[in-house]
Amino acid sequence: MSTQNATHMRQEIEEIPQVISRLLSEGRADLAAAGAALRARDPAAIVTIARGSSDHASAFLKYAIELLAGVPVASVGPSIVSIYGRELKLGRTAAISISQSGKSPDIVAMTESARRSGALTFALTNTIDSPLAAVAEHTVALRSGEEKSVAATKTFVASIVAGLGIVGNWLDDKALLAALESLPELLEQAVQVDWSPLLGALDQHNSLYVLGRGPALAIAAEAALKFKETCGMHAEAYSAAEVLHGPARIVERHFPVLVLAARDAAEASVAEVAERLAGQGARTFITSVNAQKAERLPFAASGHPMTDALALIVTFYGFVEALSRRRGFNPDQPPHLKKVTETI
């Protein structure tokens, strides 16, 4: 597809490396200040406040923070405040709110409540003059430019990178910070990785599983959402461990399974599950070389488990945009959806 005729979604996928480069350079001071504030607070726990793709970004950051800092992270339901009128006791914590628009009343209300209750509040948003940015103590602008496609792509990646930048500065994690600096180049590679063999494998199918573990589980959840949004497919995301506790029952001949494995401590166990499901007759694809029965998909490897997992979603976005068009849809305008969803 030529650039002139490309969908907004495809154009925005191709912008991701540039967006991340801009975020890391222009947002350097904001990331450092947010990291220093977290270090001064030394939180006993962290809560995240988000919905949709932003909540998947929060899940990614949960794994990053728990693995790198050893601090527990929980996603809190915004409706606790906005619908049920109950405030949480969040002293000695930090709260990270993520919203592309920064306008959803329930996200704003929960962030306000968290701040009132003593949490140190952070907003990651693409709209710097939004209500969310106004109520949080620290705001990191995603600097992603306008996102015209209903399905979030570049803002999802930017949300995770902003969170990782805060974590890297908080912990003075030089390995993570170095991985982030080289991330734009890695994502340029990820945009070009070809998953076209998976396109034909999904013809005549309307249901599949997407598996991951650790940070890649958050990526699997985001991938499953994009299958629904852009392709009208029923996709369920599972931990590669949990899928064996019941869901594997329906995995029979030719049932499609996409296994998103990163180069981390979970890779071997994830590959083992992929092999088991392939042995049951599933059409299984995996982003790992540690497989014989499952079909291998190429990937852009980073050398760091966090950025390695993140690169997978960029390749996936390119694939799912093509799949949407192959199935006769316009990925920019999914039925029944709109760009900004304001919930209470």
Image: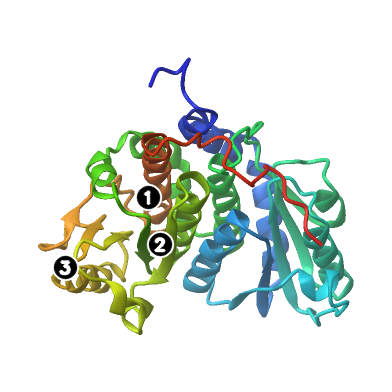
Within-10-Å neighbours for mark 2: few <14, some 14–19, many 20+: many
Residue tagged by mark 1? 312
> Given the image, on which type of amino acid does mark 1 rest?
Leu
Give the CA distance from mark 2 to mark 3: 24 Å
- The image shows residue 162, relative to residue 210, as above or below, that is above
Q: Give whichever of discs 2 and 3 has the lower sequence position.
A: 2
- Which of pointers 3 and 1 lies earlier in the amino acid sequence? 3
Three-letter residue code for mark 3: Gly
Mark 1 secondary-structure assignment? helix
Question: Circle 2 is placed at which residue position?
Answer: 216
Crowding at dot 1, Cα within 10 Å, few <14 / some 14-19 / many 20+, comes out as many
Residue 33 in percent (x, y) is at: 71, 52
* Residue type indicated by callout 2: Ala
For marks 1 and 2, give the CA distance: 8 Å
Question: Which residue is drawn at the image coordinates 85% and 78% (left, top)?
Answer: 87
Residue 150: x, y in percent?
61, 40
Say which element carries label 3. loop
Of 140 and 314, nearer the camera is 314
Residue occupying the point 64% across, 46% down = 337
Mark in front: 3 vs 1: 3
Q: Would you say 114 lies left or right of 47 here?
A: right
Quadrant where the C terminus sits is bottom right
Q: CA distance from mark 3 to mark 1?
A: 25 Å
Secondary structure at numbered mark 2: helix
Determine which residue is flagged by label 3: 281
